[in-house]
Image: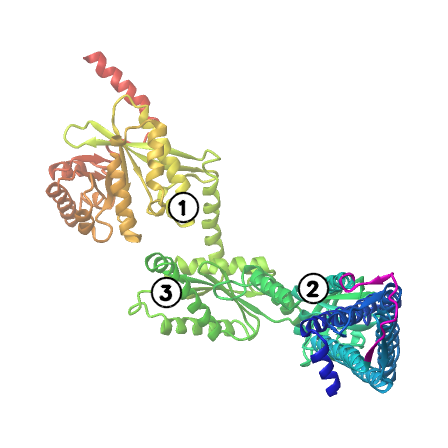
Amino acid sequence: MFSVITCIRDNHDWRLVLAAAVVCLIGAMAAMLPLSRAQECDAGRRKLWIGASAFAFGTGVWATHFIAMLAYDGGMPISYQLGLTALSFLLSVVGSWAAILVASQGRGRFSRIQGGVLMALGIASMHLTGMQAIETQAVILYDPYMTLSAVLAGALLSSIAFHAFFHLKGLRRLLASSVTFVLAICTLHFISMASITLVPDPGKEVPAMVLDTSLLAAIVVVAATALILIAIAVVFVESHLTDLRGLANASQEGLLILREGRIIDTNERFQGLSGWKLADLSGKAPSIVLTQGQNRPGETLLNTRNGREISVEVNTSRIVYRGHHCDVLAVRDLTERRQAEEMIEHLAHHDVLTDLPNRSLFDKRIRQALQMAKGKNSEVALFYIDLDRFKTVNDIFGHAEGDRILCKVASILRRVADERDTIARLGGDEFAIIQSSGQQPAAAQKLAAAILDEFAAEMDMARDPTAVGVSLGIALYPTDGSDADEICNNADIALYRVKHGGRGKACFFNAEMDEATRARRQIESELRHAITRNQIHVSYQPVLDAQNGEISGYEALMRWNRPGHGLSEPDVFIPIAEESGSIVQLGEWVLQQACKEAARWPLPLRIAVNVSPVQFMLPNLCERIEAILKETGLAPGRLEIEITEAALIRDRDRVMATLQRLRSLGVHIVMDDFGTGFSSLSNLRTFPFDKIKVDRSFTGMLDHDAAARSIVRAIIGLGHSLGMPVVTEGVETETQRQIVVEEGCAQVQGFLLGRPDVEPSTKLAARESLLSSIA
């Protein structure tokens, strides 16, 4: 051992020795990487990878030997015989190939030992041949014992290197085997170098065909460069394969690689999804983790390591992997998809805010309930529920508060209803309950009482301004209908009766309310088409100056010639139109017709048009009136908008803002039916109306009621004090006219002075012609 160290220290350039070791390490690593790939390929491709590994290893051994020889200083000039030098390279590659082939194809530890022995013999043969290629004026003497020791040491270390390679995994395999092979090569070389002695022989001739050290150095540099390039290429291939694995690991699908029906590899996604490690699955059939369950077509169950079953979708493809034709199972987790589908299904049949069944699911449940009741000869109660004051609370306190109230209502209904009952939100503030259990009507009466009591306890309107009331309409099957549509319609009729009869109560359906409600709904339906069917027309009642009797303007009055009923009274159909919302269309049409008619008049008289409180809830009312004035060409100062105090109750601030905008256009604002609403004086103080109209209910009692005369006198006096003209409508007798004139009323209106006329423009034109002829 000391002689080897002395040889390296005294007879070698340590810098070149270090370079030899580095080249040796590169050669070993460049050989181990292809050898790793060879273990994963089929027989045909394995031979190619083994050949590449042998070439890299042999080149590395040969380059290491001759770099070390360049580092050796024998005390005399040395050159190398070309043929033997080339033969040493061939022996190095062939020996490496034989050793690697035996170690790879054999089974068990003896194949590794055999490979190690062959590797040592190959290195030794290369070494001895390279030594024989030395041409110098000296004779080389060998110590056979040290030479044998070098071969045995090389065989032992090579066997250990093969053992490390075939038993370790990953980076440990690469490093351990490469470093051990470097030790084997260097040990064999330097022990052999320590065993030789150069005996000078001046008479020995050196052949002409030799390689001097400079040329050998060039050849070694080329060989080392080729070796480094091979190593870089191998690293590139390894990196490429690593990138492909990274790409596979980045996939959202789990991947199982099967060779001959057995698992050989998986990606990280599959391992994370199943909880199984590759070591647990390697060599096993995929059925250990994938089983066909009683689920949807095309789906499979994935058995995870913790015992759970996950629904997955499996797609199969075929690829060449590690040199073999393999099957790839792409496993896609369907958990999120199932959850999304269930969520979509739930949202499709449930209200988002309250999580109650919506109208779609309600329609399905009511039909199912009636079908079951029919089969069992039992009864079903259907509740239609409407919230009182909800719209007001929602408008005043905002939609967030409105949503809170709706959720609270849903909670109350869940609390009082039976688990077998279906509670649904049909839309807005409309709810429904299907009561399928219990003896009717007792069960429905009990539930209705519980709902009313719970609302009374939870929704105290005296203390909580956001509290709402509840109205219930109830219909029973089969008493009140034979199918779902009829039961729903009759429950709605019962609710309609409650809402128009006081609210805050429960009402069971009966046949009498059906007739009344049907009549009312018939009016609603016909009103929606009255304009298109030319059933609506406008009449114009004159407004006269109380002092001289001259016509100062007209009021536009809507009239409905209802088929089969004749001329319908406004008091009958206007409230219904306001409740159904059709008053918006009717009111705008009347306004347009009145402005168009007034624009044709030869005299610039004013036209008064009533605007419903419902119309004042429209955010674009002012814009629509302005557009109609421009369209008809009527001057804004000739239009009078009449409103009742009911319009100021719903949303006072919004209505006042709209009135101010209309006033800025030049439109006149008249308070109609003064004295019949709430806070009349407050309204007059807040907004300076252009005119006040005394309601006809007071005018009709002037002949015989002193109190009515006092009220009219007070209203007229109030108008004078505020600088507002007062119009008394409903004047039908001479006595009434005289009274209001005596009290100082500015204008009068009524049947005594002029009935509504469909075409006042004709009379106005005749009157204008008569005045012109007199003049």
Report the amino acid beneath label 3. Answer: Val
Whole-percent x, y for residue 117 in the image? 86, 81
Q: Residue at x 44, y 67 (%)?
A: 407
The reply to whether residue 292 is in sight is no
First of labels 3, 1 by sequence position: 3
Mark 2 residue element: helix
Density class for disc 3 (Cα within 10 Å; few <14, some 14-19, many ≥20) is many
Can you identify the residue that label 2 sits on? Answer: 239
Can you identify the residue that label 3 sits on? Answer: 468
Whole-percent x, y for residue 576 in the image? 40, 48
Task: Depth check: give the residue in front, 184 or 484.
Answer: 184
First of labels 2, 3 by sequence position: 2
Report the amino acid beneath label 2. Answer: Ser
Task: Depth check: give the residue in front, 484 or 26.
Answer: 26
> Magenta stretch containing residue 72, yes or no?
no
**Magenta-tinted stretch:** 197-215
Eyeballing the image, is 555 above or below 721? Answer: above
Can you identify the residue that label 1 sits on? Answer: 577
| 663 left or right, relative to 33 | left
Q: Residue at x 46, y 33 (%)?
A: 534
Q: Residue at x 73, y 75 (%)?
A: 174
First of labels 2, 1 by sequence position: 2
> Magenta stretch containing residue 200, yes or no?
yes
